[in-house]
Image (tube, grey):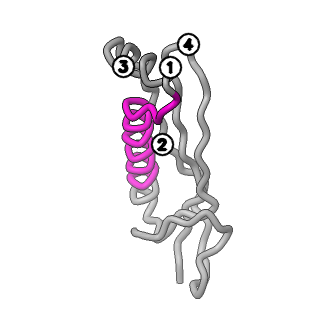
Amino acid sequence: MSLIVTTDSVPGREIAEPLGLVRGSTVRAKHIGADIVAGLRNLVGVEIKEYAALLAGAREQVLDRMIAQARGLGAGAVVAVRFETSTITQAASEILAYGTAEKLK
């Protein structure tokens, strides 16, 4: 399965059967060392690369988990994919990816 789209359908493909909601999530916490460096970067107003890398890794992980769940259902695609984040504590956040697994004709 390689079709992951944010649209409600896959252009040029017909949906044979909706298989249901699939999702992947992770909770990531900031590292004290990264916090110190980030605090210094914040003072001068530049990109905080440590947090950007943390979130990029989390997004990849949740996509991988969502895709694995979809494959387990026999899906050919996941449509209407969305990301959400929520704060668990001041130092930790949940990243969530979800969509609808679909069998394609």
Q: Which residue is mark 4?
A: 90
Mark 4 surroundings: few (<14), some (14-19) or many (≥20) residues within 10 A: few
Determine the residue positioned at 44% across, 50% down. Answer: 63
Q: Dot 1: what SS?
A: helix
Task: Compute the Cα span from label 1 to label 4.
Answer: 19 Å
> Type of residue at label 4?
Gln
Q: Is residue 18 above or below residue 86?
A: below
Q: Is residue 88 magenta?
A: no
Q: Which residue is mark 2?
A: 24
The first of marks 3 and 4 along the sequence is: 3
Q: Dot 3: what SS?
A: helix
> Type of residue at label 1?
Leu
The first of marks 2 and 3 along the sequence is: 2
Task: Compute the Cα span from label 2 to label 1.
Answer: 34 Å
The first of marks 1 and 4 along the sequence is: 1
x then y, percent, for residue 19:
57, 61
Q: Main SS of the magenta segment? A: helix
> Type of residue at label 3?
Val
Mark 3 surroundings: few (<14), some (14-19) or many (≥20) residues within 10 A: few
Question: Which of the two discs, 2 and 1, sits closer to the camera?
Answer: 1
Q: Is residue 54 magenta?
A: yes
